[in-house]
Image (cartoon, rainbow, N blue to C red):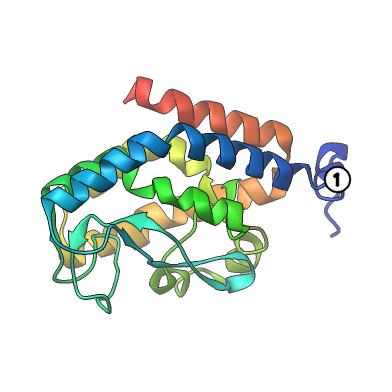
Amino acid sequence: MMRVESPLVDTFAPLNMKRAVDILIASLLSLLLLLPALLVALAIRLDSHGPLLTRPHRVGRSGRMVKVWEFRTANADPDAMETVGGCHGEQVTRIGALLRKTGVAQWPMLWSVLKGDFAIVGPRAEMPRYVGVYPPDLRKVVLSVKPGLVDLSSCEIRAERALLAGLEGDALEEAYVEKVLPRRLELGKRYVEGRGFWMDLRILIGWLAGPLLR
């Protein structure tokens, strides 16, 4: 059955409004965060040896592999396999633990928005190893649009943390794949089917209000 889209969705892509808003928001945030980011970079440099940034892989639109920028939060072999619990054998640095907990580690991902690989709002960009377990029908839907820095599941971060709290190794991966990932896929599908200006705005408001509720 052909899906009938609302007028808002119909006008979103032809006018390229979403891309224009993404560039505007990413540019403003990059300017606002420039000085704090420099201070974070200094803290990383003083805390441990190694590069300031890392470039992990994520799966983008249509299954294309993209590299994103993140602040380095651990010391690990560059070829180490990345999992939801971190790279195998990594040693999280003191400042890195704080950057992960606060989400500051992802600030450089704004460059991926400016580059065009990401949107500000969209389905969660997943690590390649977990995209392999997506059900085929959901994979096609969720990967039909650019991934986002913020998505519907960003507003449920407390519930996700509760599900994964205290788990490590295989138990952590099992809980992620069986409990967290299906919910993220469900929300990603919901976003794709109803995407538009007002949904993006609601997600951003919910994400900004998140710290007040945690």
Q: Residue at x 47, y 43 (%)?
A: 153
Residue 106 shows up from this direction: yes
Residue ID for mark 1? 15
In the displayed structure, 121 sits above or below 111; it is above
Q: Position of residue 12 (x, y in %)?
A: 80, 44
Residue 9 lies in what quarter of the image?
A: top right
Please state which of residues 147 and 70 is positioned toward the viewer in this rendering. Answer: 70
Q: Position of residue 135 (x, y in %)?
A: 53, 69
Q: Residue at x 63, y 30 (%)?
A: 201
Quarter of the image for the N terminus: give it. Answer: bottom right
Q: Residue at x 65, y 62 (%)?
A: 141
Q: Position of residue 58 (x, y in %)?
A: 46, 66
Residue 167 lies in what quarter of the image?
A: bottom left
In the displayed structure, 102 sits above or below 116; it is above
Please state which of residues 111 and 31 is positioned toward the viewer in this rendering. Answer: 31
Element assignment for label 1: loop
In the displayed structure, 78 sits above or below 53; it is below
Under mark 1, the amino acid is: Leu
